[in-house]
Image: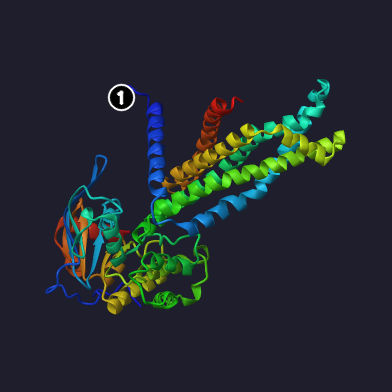
């Protein structure tokens, strides 16, 4: 059980000293009309590393991770995922990369008209070549077992609670065995107990599958426990970077103000 | 641009966007991969689920039309022309337009709300990152299903409307079924049937296109979903009359109605 008193990250140590980064972002800018959201953001994400990006609402966190799978096009800058430049990829190549990048959406984004099983089958059938030789039923049961919801296989999303939806969405993300997982507010809208269950799942996924994760969150308890490294996104740039302990003890006025504001919430 | 009133600018913007959306449909509709399974599912949802509503409306339309026209036809001593008059009215115009308007309400709003809700809950984004082209999977299949199902629904409504009309005639005028339908089929020409059927494909296209466009481009959360459903019905209904007018103009050239 994770409590507010825990200070140390429970994330597994990454191996980034000898490895090439899985995700590289250099000088990314993005504007919507006259409003510039990202003004030169930089990031390296290494294998088996959990990086948490925190920032105020509207600071561009969700836009940033959507740029990584080209749900949003960047205006300028370099975005490389698994060695491929995302803005330059043809659609077929992009789909291949997307299969290696799991994306957990804020509201789970389960397909309402499909059962849990069909939700999990959907990405599998789209990438049947990639999963060739593997039994579909077995993969679905394995994915559901990983999130502890084997019994929900025939339910519709409307019959699931918020926490169950999030776990099924995580199973759908895991089913293609991605190398990186992008989490958009994985604990938002959940009660503290369910949030803890999701945090434990994220940690288990890192330990079991050795995936790298980029996590966008407002939840500082979640950030503290699951991060190897944290980035504060402010004014469109990575304003401060370090472990939770380093940032929470920072003397920088903006970082101090950010932590104070979060604690007062 | 500053001299163009905002309402006109918005109207022109929307017309341009719908045209681009339609062009994208034609670009993607004839290229692989084809989503046949989803197309069949949509044909079931759009066609089968609308049959009861459409035949009920068609039946009442036939009854009412006959009841309203009959007294005037008696005054003119032309009551024996009732089957001809009603069949031409229903097959050429009233059947297709009323059925299409009912479908614009039922199908247009349901497509607008469904896609709008998928958009605001990021299901469309989820589909895209899972390697599926959401436009092909969601939009192309729905528009095709509307194009294919609307003519069948109109034929069902026409048939049941004529049956309703026969019931009134047989009750009030003691006309046999054989005589009534002989007169109906004697009066109907290919020039009545072909343009009336061809225009229903365009009606289906208009309903599907507008419903998908409004839902797929829905914004502003749940409020946007309601707006998408509502505006899909309004715009599709308006577009149906424009398509109908153009179809009648073109049919007039070929068949001299």
Of residues A151 and B87, which is closer to you in this image? Answer: B87
Give the SS element for disc 1: loop
Q: Position of residue A200 (x, y in %)?
A: 34, 75
Of residues B179 and A18, which is closer to you in this image? Answer: B179
Q: Position of residue A40 (x, y in %)?
A: 16, 51
Question: Does residue A163 show up?
Answer: no
Compared to residue A91, the image places residue B189 above or below, namely: above
Q: How is the image coloured?
A: rainbow
Of residues A203 and B182, which is closer to you in this image? Answer: B182
Q: Which residue is mark 1?
A: B2
Q: Is residue B67 left or right of residue A47?
A: right
Question: Does residue B183 show up?
Answer: yes
**Residue for point 45% across, 43% down:** B214
Q: Is residue B235 left or right of residue A201?
A: right
Quadrant in the picture for the C terminus of chain A: bottom left
Image quadrant where residue A179 sits: bottom left
**Residue for point 53% across, 57% down:** B41
**Residue for point 53% across, 42% down:** B204
Compared to residue A47, the image places residue A84 above or below, namely: above
Of residues A171 and A162, which is closer to you in this image? Answer: A171
**Residue for point 78% across, 32% down:** B67
The residue sitting at the left extreme is A18
Image quadrant where residue A205 sits: bottom left
Q: Position of residue B235 (x, y in %)?
A: 50, 36
Image quadrant where residue A196 sits: bottom left
Compared to residue B78, the image places residue A209 above or below, namely: below
Quadrant in the picture for the N terminus of chain A: bottom left
Chain letter, disc 1 residue: B
Within 10 Å of disc 1 (Cα), the crowding (few <14, some 14-19, many 20+) is: few
| Numbered disc total | 1
Q: Position of residue A167 (x, y in %)?
A: 41, 70
The residue sitting at the top extreme is B76
């Amino acid at each position: 059980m994770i409590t507010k008193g825990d200070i140390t990250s429970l994330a597994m140590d990454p191996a980034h000293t000898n490895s090439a980064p899985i995700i590289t972002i250099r000088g990314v800018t993005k504007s919507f009309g006259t409003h510039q959201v990202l003004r030169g953001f930089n990031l390296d994400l290494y294998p088996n590393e959990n990086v948490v990006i925190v920032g105020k609402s509207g600071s561009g966190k969700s836009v940033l991770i959507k740029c990584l799978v080209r749900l949003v096009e960047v205006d300028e800058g370099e975005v490389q995922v698994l060695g491929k430049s995302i803005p330059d990829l043809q659609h077929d190549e992009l789909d291949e990369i997307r299969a290696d990048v799991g994306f957990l959406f804020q509201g789970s984004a389960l397909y309402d008209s499909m059962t849990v099983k069909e939700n999990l089958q959907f990405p599998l059938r789209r990438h049947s070549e990639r999963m060739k030789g593997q039994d579909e039923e077995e993969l679905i049961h394995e994915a559901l077992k990983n999130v502890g919801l084997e019994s929900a296989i025939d339910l519709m999303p409307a019959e699931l609670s918020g926490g169950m939806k999030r776990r099924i969405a995580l199973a759908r993300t895991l089913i293609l065995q991605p190398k990186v997982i992008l989490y958009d507010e994985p604990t938002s809208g959940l009660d503290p107990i369910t949030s803890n269950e999701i945090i434990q799942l994220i940690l288990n996924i890192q330990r079991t599958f050795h995936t790298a994760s980029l996590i966008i969150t407002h939840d500082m308890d979640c950030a503290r426990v699951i991060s190897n490294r944290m980035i504060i996104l402010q004014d469109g740039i990575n304003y401060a970077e370090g472990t939770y302990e380093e940032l929470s003890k920072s003397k920088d006025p903006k970082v101090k103000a950010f932590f104070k504001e979060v604690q007062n919430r | 641009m500053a001299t163009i009133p905002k309402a006109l600018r918005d109207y022109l913007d929307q017309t341009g966007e719908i045209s681009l959306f339609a062009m994208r449909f034609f670009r993607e509709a004839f290229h692989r991969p084809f989503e046949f399974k989803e197309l069949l599912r949509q044909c079931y949802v759009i066609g089968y689920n609308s049959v009861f509503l459409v035949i009920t409306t068609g039946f009442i339309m036939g009854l009412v039309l006959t009841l309203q026209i009959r007294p005037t036809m008696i005054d003119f001593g032309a009551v024996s022309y009732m089957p001809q008059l009603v069949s031409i009215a229903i097959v050429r115009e009233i059947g297709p337009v009323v059925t299409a308007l009912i479908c614009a309400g039922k199908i247009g709003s349901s497509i607008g709300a469904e896609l709008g809700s998928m958009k605001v809950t990021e299901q469309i984004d989820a589909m895209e990152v899972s390697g599926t082209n959401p436009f092909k999977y969601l939009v192309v299949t729905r528009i095709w299903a509307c194009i294919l199902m609307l003519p069948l629904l109109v034929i069902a409504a026409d048939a049941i409307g004529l049956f309703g009309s026969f019931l009134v005639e047989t009750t009030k005028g003691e006309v046999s079924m054989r005589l009534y339908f002989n007169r109906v089929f004697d009066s109907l020409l290919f020039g009545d049937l072909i343009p009336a059927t061809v225009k229903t494909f365009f009606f289906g296209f208009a309903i599907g296109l507008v419903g998908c466009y409004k839902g797929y481009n829905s914004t502003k959360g749940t409020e946007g979903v309601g707006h998408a459903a509502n505006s899909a019905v309004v715009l599709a209904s308006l577009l149906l009359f424009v398509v109908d007018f153009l179809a009648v103009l073109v049919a007039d050239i070929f068949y001299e109605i």
